[in-house]
Amino acid sequence: MKLPASTEWLLHCAATLAQLEPGASASAAQLARYYDLPAPYLAKQLQDLVKSGVLTATTGPRGGFRLARPPSEITLLRIVEAVDGTSPPYECREIRQQGRGALRPEECQSTCVLAQKMTEAHDAWRHSLAGVSLADIIATLPPTAPARTRSRLGGS
Amino acid sequence: MKLPASTEWLLHCAATLAQLEPGASASAAQLARYYDLPAPYLAKQLQDLVKSGVLTATTGPRGGFRLARPPSEITLLRIVEAVDGTSPPYECREIRQQGRGALRPEECQSTCVLAQKMTEAHDAWRHSLAGVSLADIIATLPPTAPARTRSRLGGS
């Protein structure tokens, strides 16, 4: 059970965009340089966050990416699921209905109790990440962090 | 973020073994027939559960596998981690320390707050699965289930 390495990239990029002045944006090239990441692959991933409604892409010579909503309304869950998708890690293939021990269909009208418990665990994971917004993350940074972030991100 | 398909197999096999008479065991071939699973691959996975202390392998003509401890002491977490390992899904590669935005080492003596939050979510998932034992699962089955399970599992 592994999240893609780009999960770290996009969490950090979103936290970086949350430190920009309102309305400002950063390009994929700027973000790639900021974290020393492969720009083409990062650009593709940033587009996935646009599709998921986490980021907005702006066009033009000073175009780039900015948050699609206030940092307080973007949770870590939204970012992680934008990168990795929303399908749960445990897949129930109903093996209880196959083989010599197969239950009859009428005995399987409720979800398998093992699948239920795996879903409850995934719900606990989602609930934990849904309780943390980018605003919460920024609030933990030193007060000088946003100005430094903007300064180092700047330039073309 | 996916668990292997064999996670379902082993959760069900462990729940099946939890329904045997005390001291009784079942072979990989019996369990494979019970759920129509590929016996050689299942046997390998059952051995992984032996290594993790969930099952005990018994030898001899009536040998096989049985639970290594009472069902109340075997949690779903132990089984899932025996199948998939214990490494957390999110890996922090410290990208905060690389690129143009790199923080200095002395600024990174605490774990990155994003990694902390991802760890908290994984802890919530683990806590949920650690709260459910095989005894809890068996308690949800109809009272007639264990006798039927033993009858259908039997035979060589």
Image: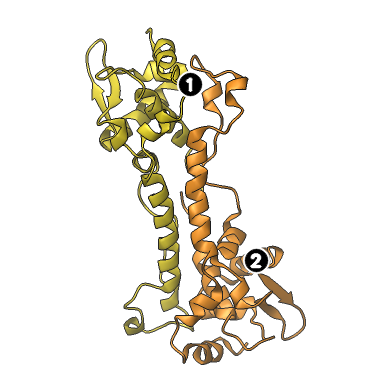
Chain colours: A orange, B yellow
Q: What is the CA distance from the residue labelled 1 to the residue labelled 2?
A: 41 Å
Query: Badge 1, how many Cα within 10 Å: few under 14, some, many 20+?
Result: many
Q: Nearer the viewer, residue A114 or A40?
A: A114
Residue at the outermost right position: A60
Q: Is residue B52 visible?
A: yes
Relative to B135, B68 lies left or right? left
Residue A102, image x, y percentages: 53, 18
Q: Nearer the viewer, residue B135 or A150?
A: B135
Q: Residue at x 52, y 88 (%)?
A: A146
Report the number of discs: 2
Tell me: residue A130, above or below residue A120. below
Residue B101, image x, y percentages: 48, 83
Residue at the outermost top position: B155
Same subunit, tags 1 and 2: no
Disc ID at residue A49: 2
Tell me: residue B5, above or below residue B42. below
Tell me: residue B127, above or below residue B136. below
Classify mark 2: helix, strand or loop: helix
Q: Residue at x 59, y 31 (%)?
A: A110
Disc ID at residue B35: 1
Of all chains, the one bearing label 2 is A
Indicate the amino acid at tag 1: Tyr
Toward which corner of the image does residue A62 lie, by quadrant? bottom right
